[in-house]
Every structure is written in C-alpha cells, then in structure tokens.
Amino acid sequence: MNLKSLTSTEILGYSFLILLYVLGIYFANTDPSYFKSTYAREDGFVEYTTAAMLLYISILSFSRLFKLWSVKPALWKLGVLGFALIFLFGAGEEISWGQRIFDIESSAYFKENNAQQETNLHNMVVGETKINKLIFSQILTIVLVIYLIILPLLYRKFEGIKNLVDKFAVPLPRWNHTIAFLLATVLLSFIPSDKKWEVYELAFSIIFLLIFLNPFNKYIYEKN
C-alpha cells in the first residue's frame, strides 16, 4: 500500500480502523467480559458507528443521484439508486430499524421467526437455516471476493467489463481498499470472541465508505 497515494480521508479512515482493531484485540484478550458487554455490545459505539457509516454511503449515493440526474443515463441512475437503497437497508438492519432505540416491541411473527426476536431480516430463521449465516456470511463472502479482488483485475484487463461497470456506476475499489479489507479479515482471527463480527462489520462499513468516496473510477461521478 503506497501511503503517498492515500487521500487525507483514507488516512483518517485507516487510522480509525487500526485503533478499532488494536483496542478490540487488546480487550478481547485481556478482558473478554468488557469486550463483550461494553466494547462490542448491542446498541453500543461499534454498532451505531457501523449504522452511521452505512447511512452516510446511502446519503452520499442519493446526493450524487439528485445532483447528476439531468446529465446521466438511465442505467447509471439505476446503479446509483440501487446502492443507495442497499446501504440504507443495511443501516436500518444494523439497528433493527430503530426498534431498541424507540423501545418498539416486535410483532408475534418476528418473535416466532427471528433468532433475536427483533424486527429485522438478517436474524430471521427459515426452517433450520439462519438467514444471517446463509446470506450475510456465505453469499456475502463470495460477493466480496469477486468485488474486491476479481473485479478490479477484470476491469483493468477487459474493456467490456470496464464499460459495464462504469455504465452501472459501480465504484471500483482501489488496491489499498482491497489490502485493507484482507488485513481486517486476517486480524479478526486475533479476537477470540463471538462478538468479533461486530468489529468486522464496522471495518466493512469504513472501507466501503472509503471506496465510495474515492473509487478507482471516480470519473463516473463527474458530469461529463
């Protein structure tokens, strides 16, 4: 990773990410109870910051959509709108759509079919299968590998892939984003707690925000 090529926002983001992991690894190994009940707890700093990052990506996408609506083609608008809605959904799911914040009781359906009896989809259980495990672990892992590693290679090599990615306004990760995500994944193994995934979700949201702010194909957000 070439530090000279990083923007000031990326330096700030990666610094925060390093601090997040240093403290997470320290507390998880020296005071597991504090890590679980305070550092990475439900409705805590880590979870709310994750939701805030995802929401910011959504707002950023909506802002670009409205700003460039009159000069961009339909497929570009479709792509940006899709990302805006996806990250808005992610932010809402992260905090169960404000259920615990506003002390809203779950309906009977969610109490019966949700692993945490909360009003969200990612903790739903269908038969013996947890949606969170299937979609947000297995399928998402495949998507991330394709997006962060395979797609950047194909984009640089094949003009057809490049045109398709740009046409749908898919922000392409720079290599520093890919490296940061791989390091965040490896460092997760040093956190011996089942709550480590809260830290990983925050790392995910930080890196994706940096991608959307400064993608390799940043010109897709220009007027011409």
Image (cartoon, rainbow, N blue to C red):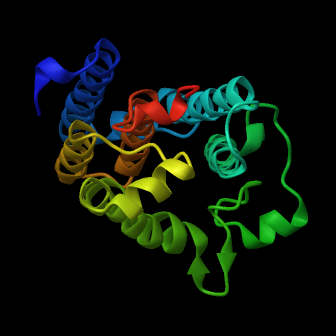
**Residue 172 occupies which quadrant of the picture?**
top left
- In the figure, is residue 94 to the left or right of 176? right
Residue 150: x and y in percent read 28, 63
Residue 48: x and y in percent read 56, 30
Q: Residue at x 63, y 40 (%)?
A: 91
Q: Which residue lies furthest to the top in this view?
A: 8
Residue 64: x and y in percent read 64, 28
Residue toward you, 19 or 217: 217
Q: In this view, does 157 lie above or below 196?
A: below
Q: Which residue is drawn at 55% across and 40% down?
A: 42
Residue toward you, 152 or 124: 152
Q: Which residue is drawn at 24% across and 44% down?
A: 184
Residue toward you, 152 or 190: 152
Q: Residue at x 42, y 65 (%)?
A: 143
Q: Could one spot residue 44 in this view of the protein? A: no
Q: Could one spot residue 68 in this view of the protein? A: yes
Residue toward you, 108 or 19: 19
Number of marks in the image?
A: 0
The quadrant in which the N terminus is found is top left
Residue 161: x and y in percent read 39, 62
Q: Which residue lies furthest to the right in this view?
A: 107
